[in-house]
Image (spheres, coloured by chain):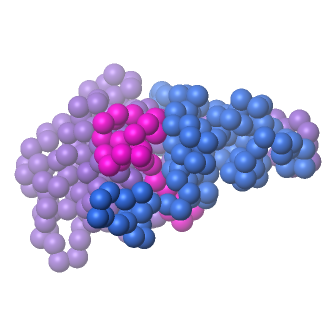
Amino acid sequence: MSDRGQTWFDEAAGPLVRPYAVTRGRTRADRPDLQVITLVMALHPMSEIPERGLDPEHLQILSRSLRPISIAEIASELQLPLSVVKILVGDLIGRKLLIFRSAITPDIQVIQAVINGIRRL
Amino acid sequence: MAFDGSDPHPPGLAASAVKILIAGGFGVGKTTMVASVSEIPPLRTEELITELSRDVDDLTGVEGKTTTTVALDFGRITVDPQLVLYLFGTPGQDRFWFLWNELAQGAIGAVVLADTRRLDACFPAVDFFESRGIPLVIGVNRFAGAPLYTVEEVRAALDLADVPTMLCDVRDRESCKELLLLLGEHALARVAGAPPRSVLS
């Protein structure tokens, strides 16, 4: 992994497990509708999850999704890049283990709700 | 919103999320502002951005040297049981978050923080949001020891007549709330088709 005469140390060498290894080489999310603030939630309790075909990262995502949680929060907790989490979340949606709610376009009602929410802080 | 983990038929996911971006130059207080109003301590995550693809949904090319990692600090405000607001700030001195188009898409708007000692540091962020038609307001953070200016003086120096601007202290929760409310009202006026407010406080 080094150019001629060049050696990479520590952070310069990159993470120990490269992100695209976690995704089994996949570099593109099948679901372009997943965004940083897309909320996901597990459809089943962990005891009912079939582990066959799931990687440890998949299970870690499911265990954090027993309440609604954003892609951003999952990525932060698992210390994985957002793009990688989107691919893994896409797998789980495809297997009907997660449901998701896309980010909404801020209209008048939404912005007014946000204003009211900030006032209550 | 929460459901019993033993329930085999959880209710549908009723909540959805919106976002506001906190932008500005290096060291201007973006993460501090997130921390001041968030209900959780700010979290950090990162994204791989390839300068070639300009598409962060796509990891193609991450093996190459044109990839950079852009960090993101964010906080959360539960507006009501159905709506969560996320506040995103890009910490550090990274130039590359401007490649991160998804982050800006669909945002209610952006707070651009400015420092009177380096006013020009906020211009790239202002240009970024203006060119995309994203509502923005400017918060002029009051740093200890920095020269004190009036809002009028700062606005004249920025030459941004149509951007709502106010003085703020990003360490102060109430001040950050005021700044977010200024943005909220500005975004509301834009969505409602009213002329944007140019002066406030």
Magenta part of the protein: which range? B40-67
Which residue: 53% across, 50% down?
A19
The image quarter containing residue B41 is: bottom right
For the residue pair B6 and B188, the one nearer the viewer reads as B6
Tell me where residue B125 appears, x and y as whole percent: 24, 46
Identify the main secondary structure in magenta.
loop
For the residue pair B11 and A15, the one nearer the viewer reads as A15
The image quarter containing residue A95 is: top right
Query: Left or right of A119: which side holds A62?
Result: right
Residue B62 colored magenta?
yes
Which residue: 56% across, 57% down?
A17
Residue B52 colored magenta?
yes
Q: Tell me if residue A108 comes above or below residue A85 in the rendering.
A: above
Image quarter where the N terminus of chain A lies is bottom left
Whether residue A114 is visible to the viewer of this picture, yes or no, is: no
Tell me where residue B112 appears, x and y as whole percent: 28, 50
The image quarter containing residue A52 is: top right
Which residue: 29% across, 64% down?
A5
Chain A colour in the picture: blue
Q: Tell me if residue B14 comes above or below residue A2 in the rendering.
A: above
Q: Tell me if residue B11 comes above or below residue A19 in the rendering.
A: above
Query: Left or right of B133: which side holds B77?
Result: right
Tell me where residue B77 appears, x and y as whole percent: 55, 52
* Residue lying furthest front: A4
Tell me where residue A40 appears, x and y as whole percent: 67, 40
Whether residue A2 is visible to the viewer of this picture, yes or no, is: yes
Query: Left or right of B48: which side holds B164?
Result: left
How many marks on residues?
0
* Residue lying furthest bottom: B145
Chain that is coloured purple in the picture = B
